[in-house]
Image: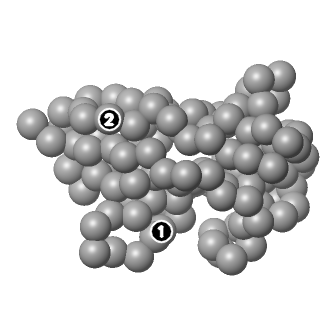
Amino acid sequence: VQLQASGGGLVQPGGSRRLSCAASGFTPGYYAIGWFRQAPGKEREWVSCISSSDGRTYYADSVKGRFTISRHNAKNTVYLQMNSLKPEDTAEYYCAAEGSSWCTTREYEYAYWGQGTQVTVSS
């Protein structure tokens, strides 16, 4: 079971970036997939999740209206489209598969984790 996050990089404030989370070894369509992020010196925080049971999406208040999570089941990939990026969005971003088809914000309920991809928002 493996999750591979990619798409990070340097972005100017107000810019956009799309992160990808590619799954192998299991079918992500059966699991809720979440995105977390961790800024230097801060705890890892939940950002967004997409349920596999009903396709519903959930967002942290800090990113609501700016980030969009989606999934392409045929490609075994989940995306996080990030728009109107702010310097405070700078962090290492991680994708994770929850142990069921339902979303949760609780980190310990995510069974599988990918390595992080760094997003830096700076001019």
Report if residue 56 is visible in the image: no
Q: Position of residue 18 (x, y in %)?
A: 46, 30
Which residue matches tag 1? 45
Q: Is disc 2 placed on a helix, strand or loop?
A: strand
Q: Residues within 10 Å of mark 1 (few under 14, many from 20)?
A: some
Which residue is outermost to the left? 123
Identify the residue at horizontal 82%, vertical 60% (top origin). Answer: 102
Q: Which residue is mark 2?
A: 9
- Answer with left or right where residue 27 lies relative to residue 83: right
Q: Residue 66 falls in which quadrant of the image?
A: top left
Quadrant (top left/top right/bottom left/bottom right) for the C terminus: top left
Residue 118 lies left or right of residue 2; in this view the side is left
Check disc 2: other Cα within 10 Å, few if <14, some if 14-19, many if 20+.
some
Residue 24 visible? The answer is yes
Whole-percent x, y for residue 65 in the image: 44, 43
The residue at the point 25 percent across, 35 percent down is: 10
